Image: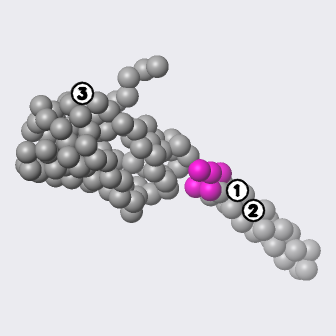
Amino acid sequence: MKPLLVGIGVIALALLAAAYLVWHGIYGVQHKAEFELSNRSQEVLASVQVVICGQTIEVRALQQGQATTRNFKSGCEGHYTVRVQFQSGRQLNKDVGYVTGGLDIRDVIVVTSSNVELSKPEAK
């Protein structure tokens, strides 16, 4: 009876160790997470706030036709909340896209005069 209990204990420990390695292999590794913010509107973006994974990233004075890239810490699941203030004072707020923890993230957030949308990055 005692050897059976020891065998069960060894198997249980092996399963726990395997689960630990899988968990930390997927969620413990710091994955690359970034987005490009592209201004395709007809005016300067006075300020843009992007909220993702509990982080607020702010960009100021993004000129027409310009883009900027920002990094963030991944490890959560959720959408981007984008708040845009145009130079004219007009505002645009939208939730776009979806990120998944455990993966590298490279998204492009495009602001036009009337919308915020997510597009795929161009191939390099």
Q: Is residue 48 magenta?
A: no
Q: On screen, 123 above or below 73?
A: above
The segment highlighted magenta reads 25-30
Residue at point 35%, 58% (across, down) = 56
Q: On screen, 102 above or below 107?
A: below
Q: Within the image, what quadrant is residue 12 found in?
A: bottom right
Q: Amino acid at mark 2?
A: Ala
Residue at point 32%, 52% (across, down) = 58
Residue at point 24%, 27% (across, down) = 65
Disc 1 or disc 3, which is closer to the eye?
Answer: 3
Q: Alpha carbon of mark 3 to alpha carbon of mark 2: how far?
A: 51 Å
Disc 2 marks which residue?
A: 17
Badge 1: residue crowd in 10 Å (few <14, some 14–19, many ≥20):
few
Disc 3 marks which residue?
A: 65
Residue at point 20%, 46% (across, down) = 46
- Which label's residue is closer to the chain start, 1 or 3? 1
Kind of element beneath mark 1: helix
Give the quarter of the figure containing the N terminus.
bottom right
Kind of element beneath mark 3: loop
